[in-house]
Image (cartoon, rainbow, N blue to C red):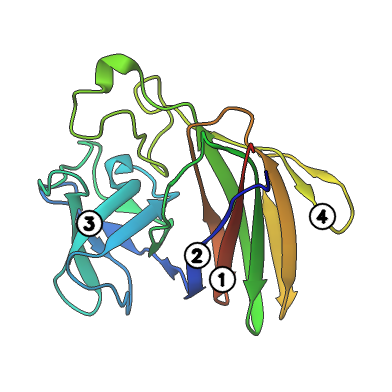
């Protein structure tokens, strides 16, 4: 029996945006110049400081060309600030699909840029939240990008560069710097339940990421 294969597009020529600030309020309002997001869009925020409740995957309401508010992606409820004060820094990007990967043995990620790009992306995996969380709105699905905690477990994974066969540690991530880059990496799913990929730093360029999933057959 031949293995079944599926190609999933996670980013299609997507450009992250730098975050200037956020309000410690309900809902959180994020300022990011010319963000380009539309109401109802899923957005991932990572690396935001002080007001860390703004990190994670949310649906957004576009307020102006430079501001948007955050809503829970499952319930639609307004997201409250962390209570620590206004936030700063970090980046926002169109949220990638989260791959339910327990039926796959391997996944190959193809990462490409058009023009000059400078970014670091990491592949994140999770066994899911505890069964006690299964009845909550998110079920066992963690909120990737949000603070890692016992109630929100995920980890950045080691991968293999298919050009050099070198292992790339999860803590390091994939450093993409240059012009018109195309790189391929293999992930041994290792029993993970959920898998996704997102930029953890960025200063220039758009990225395209596709995943090829292969079954255990």
Q: Nearer the viewer, mark 2 or mark 1?
A: 2
Query: How far across and down, in percent of the image, does residue 23 sit?
Result: 19, 53
Sequence order check: which comes first, mark 4 or mark 3?
3
Cβ–Cβ below 8 Å for labels 4 and 2? no
Q: Which residue is mark 3?
A: 59
Cα separation, mark 2 vs mark 3, equals 19 Å
Check the image and report above or below for 170 versus 12: above
Q: Which mark is residue 162?
A: 4
Sequence order check: which comes first, mark 4 or mark 1?
4
Between 39 and 80, which is closer to the camera in this rendering? 39
Sequence order check: which comes first, mark 3 or mark 1?
3
On the rendered structure, is 5 left or right of 87? right
Residue at 29% x, 59% y is 42
Query: How far across and down, in percent of the image, does residue 200 sit?
Result: 54, 53
Q: Which residue is mark 1?
A: 208
Sequence order check: which comes first, mark 2 or mark 3?
2
Which image quarter holds the N terminus?
A: top right
Neighbour tally class for label 1: few under 14, some 14-19, many 20 plus, Cα within 10 Å: some
Query: How far across and down, in percent of the image, does residue 211 sit?
Result: 58, 57
On the rendered structure, is 72 left or right of 21? left
Inspect this view and state whether residue 14 appears.
Answer: no
Numbered disc 3: secondary structure: strand
On the rendered structure, is 130 left or right of 189? left
Residue at 70% x, 58% y is 175
Numbered disc 1: secondary structure: strand
Neighbour tally class for label 2: few under 14, some 14-19, many 20 plus, Cα within 10 Å: some
Check the image and report above or below for 63 versus 125: below
Cβ–Cβ below 8 Å for labels 2 and 1? yes
Query: How far across and down, in percent of the image, does residue 107 sit?
Result: 64, 48
């Amino acid at each position: 029996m031949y293995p079944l294969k599926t190609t999933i597009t996670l980013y299609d020529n997507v450009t992250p945006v730098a975050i200037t600030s956020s309000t410690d309020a309900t809902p959180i309002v994020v300022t990011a110049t010319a963000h380009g997001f539309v109401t109802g869009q899923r957005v991932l925020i990572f690396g935001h400081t002080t007001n860390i409740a703004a990190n994670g995957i949310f649906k957004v309401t576009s307020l102006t060309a430079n501001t948007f508010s955050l809503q829970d992606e499952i319930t639609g409820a307004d997201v409250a600030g962390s209570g620590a004060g206004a936030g700063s820094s970090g980046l926002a990007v169109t949220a990638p699909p989260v791959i339910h990967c327990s039926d796959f043995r391997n996944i190959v990620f193809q990462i490409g840029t058009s023009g000059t790009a400078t970014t670091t992306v990491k592949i994140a995996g999770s066994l899911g939240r505890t069964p006690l969380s299964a009845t909550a709105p998110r079920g066992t699905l963690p909120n990737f990008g949000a603070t890692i905690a016992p109630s929100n477990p995920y980890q950045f994974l080691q991968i293999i560069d298919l050009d050099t066969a070198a292992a790339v540690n999860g803590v390091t991530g994939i450093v993409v710097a240059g012009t018109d880059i195309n790189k391929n990496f293999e992930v041994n799913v290792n029993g993970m339940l959920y898998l996704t990929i997102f930029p953890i730093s960025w200063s220039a360029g758009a990225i395209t990421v596709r995943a090829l999933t292969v079954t255990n057959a």
